[in-house]
Amino acid sequence: MQSSLETPESYTPEAQHSCVELSGVVLTLRDDLRFTLQHDGAADTYLIEDHARTKFYRVGIAEFAFISLLDGHVTIAEAHGLAASALGAQALNDQETAGLCRWLVENQLASTPASLTSCRMADAADKHRFQKRLASLSLVSAKLPLGNPDRVIHAISPLLGWWFSPLGFFLWTIVLGCGLLSLFGAADRIDPSAETVIDRSNWIWLGITWFLLKLVHELAHGLACKRFGGTVREFGVVLFMLIPLPYVDVTSAWKFRSRSRRILTSAAGVMAELMIAAIAAILWSRSTSPLIVQHAFNVMLSGSLITLMFNANPLMRFDAYYILTDWLGMPNLATHASQMVRRAVRKFFLGIEAPAAHGNLRWRWFIASYGIAAMAWRIVMCTALILGAEQMLWGAGIALALFAATFWFILPIARTLHFIVWGTPTSQPNRWQFCKAIAIVSLLIGGILMAPWYGQTTAPAIVGYDPLIQVRAPTMGFVKRVAVRSGQQVRAGDVLLELENQPLQMRTAELEAQVQRSQIRARIYAASHQAAAYDVEQQQLTAIESQLYDRRSMLSNLVIRSAKPGIVIGESLESLLGTYVAPGETLMTLGPQGQCRIQALVPQRELEHFVARVGQSVRVQMFGSPGFQGRLEHVDPRGDTRLPHAALSAAAGGAIATHANRQPDSEPEDGIAAFPSDDSSDTVFEATEAYFAAIIRVDESELTGKLGATGWVGFRSHRGNVASVLWHRFQNWISKRPRESGSI
């Protein structure tokens, strides 16, 4: 929405002509202007309507008192004297009167005999055409008018204008509520949908969705303005950093006497987008088609979050700004705030005193704070747009970023330096004050950069046992019985599982029968004094008994017992019933009793800080529970890419980037039989970089019911001074850019 309201405060006394004596000039106000008194909070203002050019201006009571006297017969000095006698201390001073007169002439609201000469009018027309052509050629914010949409909006207003009525607002509230309920009810689908949004293949669709929503946004402004009696005189597109932004001119909304109607006209675009986003949320939560889900999420994101970030930000002259100024009754908030900050900056750096704005402004502290916040926001946004253009638009983005940086930063700085060195015929800077101000700012910045930086040092962590005892199958077989459940405490020697191996049992029975037959034959040979046959039979009996001993040992391993007391760790242990297990296959895990602790994985960049913290307290925060204190007991100096639990991997929602890898063979642990595994599908998650294991001891009561919970451990540590930290982060950003920009 383009809803500009020009005011005389936009002209400062420094812009006045110094070579003309204004007191004797006769200024004539145009007779076709309309003046309307409006009540904006505690301050009354007059709205000036230039019907011929469909423009609106707002002035205060003191300005109107002076303007109303410009009938073409009195001089400026006489009009100023009459206004001063009527208003007293509230009247304009000489500088404000001069600035107001120039503002009237420049905006063609009043004229002097000199301003009506053909030469002056031709110069003004040429200057206007040049500025318009320059704006249209700008790569930063080129404005392309596309015509007058008033007839089109007038034609569709009977069909859609009723939305801006009590009934429409009621339906809008219901749709918005249904959309929010649908969003909360399908919250688990947000993360998968968000991953598709940030994919580059979706950027074009997201841009098209955003542009179409902006068309609806501007149409809603036009419909609201038309319904309340206004006109829409222009429609077009602004190319902001080559990004097309539709706009409509609903400046006529300023003539509405009702403040609520002006506010509703300003809010109409955001309301329309939020309603469409709510409808998209309903479709997104109920659809099973991947295509509909993706596009509905694009609409939902563009019509809610992105719209609220810009149009609902009062620091920018978009919808929220006009809503705020109408609500507070401060129509010239941005102008006053900008002038207040500008006056303070000029006084501090250049020693140039400038008179304060006319009248007793309410809430000066609020206006000053708004001006500082708006200036900071503009700097941040300009910088972000420059960096974003350079990143997203590839080669063309670099040229566009350089052009924007020149337009927004380099040229203003150059003009300021030119003024400091040479000044102007009417104003000279105090160069000594400038040097002092620069010295103060330099010392302040230097002090900030040299100040120590205490940052938060963190590492992802998980609650577990150390060391874990892996229970593996000592022999092959089918699971006959699971004697324990997950979380159960067991003692040493308790039965965990029973396996069944019928071929092994049958082979054992055969060997037992062979032993009996061999013993009988040996006794017969001994009784018949066949010494040679007896010796041969004894050798065969020894071999058979050896095989039988091995088979009986294997049979005894079919009953798997706990070697140590602990807690059973495993999921869906009942699902093991009837399944075949190979030698060495992991069946469950035992956590040694009394050895539950927190294990953190420290990245290489934080290793130095964690090593220096050994023996001291650290902050422990498990997700979904209050934080508590622990003691950093040990940091393993050997890095490893294997993760203690898959929950720490990014694939499972953790903080560590991982990739799948085949599980290596394990050594026997704590008396539990272990065998090499031939199962190629037995894989683990490995980190893409080495991490160092750190053990944190805490009170056992803090870990009750938190086995397997993930979170982080951290503490504040000295990271160096501010300058070194910023430089290090800048270097990291530079080093990552080629990789990121090259990956598609």
Image (cartoon, rainbow, N blue to C red):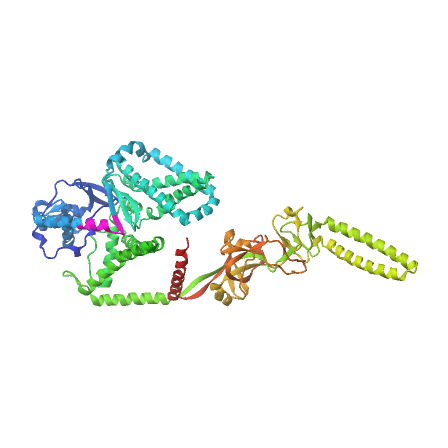
Quadrant position of residue 466: bottom right
List x then y, in percent, for residue 233. 22, 40
Q: How many marks?
A: 0
Q: Quadrant of the N terminus?
A: top left
Q: Please state which of residues 323 and 357 is positioned toward the viewer in this rendering.
A: 323
Query: Which residue occupies 66% across, 51% down?
Result: 581
Q: Is residue 492 visible?
A: yes
Q: Is residue 134 magenta?
A: yes
Quarter-of-image position of residue 32:
top left
Seen as rendered, the residue at the extreme right is 528
**In the image, is 186 to the left or to the right of 82?**
right
Where residue 736 appears, as percent x and y from the top left, is 41, 59
Asked whether, in this view, residue 560 is left or right of residue 723, the answer is right
Q: Position of residue 388 (x, y in %)?
A: 35, 54
Residue at 90%, 58% in the rendered image = 525
Say if residue 710 shows up in the picture: no
Q: Residue furthest front?
A: 532
Q: Position of residue 300 (x, y in %)?
A: 40, 43
Q: Is residue 721 magenta?
A: no
Q: Looking at the image, which is closer to me, 308 or 143? A: 143
Q: Magenta residues, as a range?
A: 130-142
